[in-house]
Image (cartoon, rainbow, N blue to C red):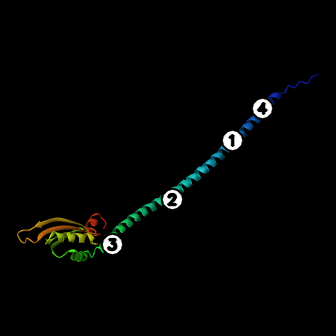
Amino acid sequence: MAYINLLPWREKIEKAKQRAFFTALTVVALGALVVVFLISQFYQMRIDGQNERNQFLKDEIEVLDLRIVKIKLLNEKKKELEKRINVVEQLQRSRNVGTQVLNEIANIVPNGIYLTRLEKQDNSLNIIGKSESNNHLANMIRKIERSGLFDDAVLESITANNAKSKLLSDFKMRVRIKGLLNHYDSINQGSLK
């Protein structure tokens, strides 16, 4: 007689296949989760490392910014000191200007010219006096131009005075003193604080 198996063997095989499928699916899902977790941890470590480097750079930039501010302040102080040194040097060079001016005036004034007044304004000198002739004035202007102390001689006026003497004429001349610092201008500009 023929053997007939009445047991549900197909259902058992199908259930075993389903269990194996779900087990494999669970293992694959857990493996995928582990891989995703590991990848996210790797990139998170890289992000944290980059953030630490960025923070280090920010801290160093702040330190350098403070140094830059200090350097700017030092440069400003240096410029102020250089201005002061220049003013002091200029004053040192010009401290004997009065004596030098009078000495040079004695050298350039020829016979026949009589000085009545000298006025100093800033770095220019107004010479007021009397002259016997215009030739004497021309000689004086030539001497001024060759002088090492004076420059830019400008004869402002020659006036013949008939009342006192017909031989003498009044003149007014302006001369620039070379290299003389206008001390008051430098104070007004803030060089000396």
Residue at position x 56%, y 55% in the image: 53
How far apart in space, not on screen, are marks 1 and 2 (Cα)?
42 Å
Instruction: Name the N-terminal-most of marks 3 and 1.
Output: 1
Residue 35 sits above or below residue 97 on the image: above
Q: Quadrant of the C terminus?
A: bottom left
Dot label at residue 164: none
Circle 2 residue: 60
Circle 3 residue: 89
Q: Nearer the viewer, mark 4 or mark 3?
A: 3
Residue type at numbered disc 4: Lys
Q: Tell me the SS state at disc 2.
A: helix
Q: Quadrant of the N terminus?
A: top right
Q: Nearer the viewer, mark 3 or mark 1?
A: 3
How far apart in space, not on screen, are marks 4 and 3 (Cα)?
108 Å
Circles 2 and 4: CB distance less than 8 Å? no
Residue at position x 40%, y 64% in the image: 75
Q: Tell me the SS state at disc 1.
A: helix
Residue 126 shows in this picture:
no
Circle 1 residue: 32
Instruction: Name the N-terminal-most of marks 2 and 4.
Output: 4
Circles 4 and 1: CB distance less than 8 Å? no
Instruction: Name the N-terminal-most of marks 1 and 2.
Output: 1
How far apart in space, not on screen, are marks 3 and 2 (Cα)?
42 Å
Q: Does residue 62 appear left or right of residue 186 in this picture? A: right
Residue type at numbered disc 1: Ala
Residue type at numbered disc 2: Glu
Dot label at residue 15: 4
Q: Nearer the viewer, mark 4 or mark 1?
A: 1
Q: Quadrant of residue 102?
A: bottom left
Instruction: Name the N-terminal-most of marks 4 and 3.
Output: 4
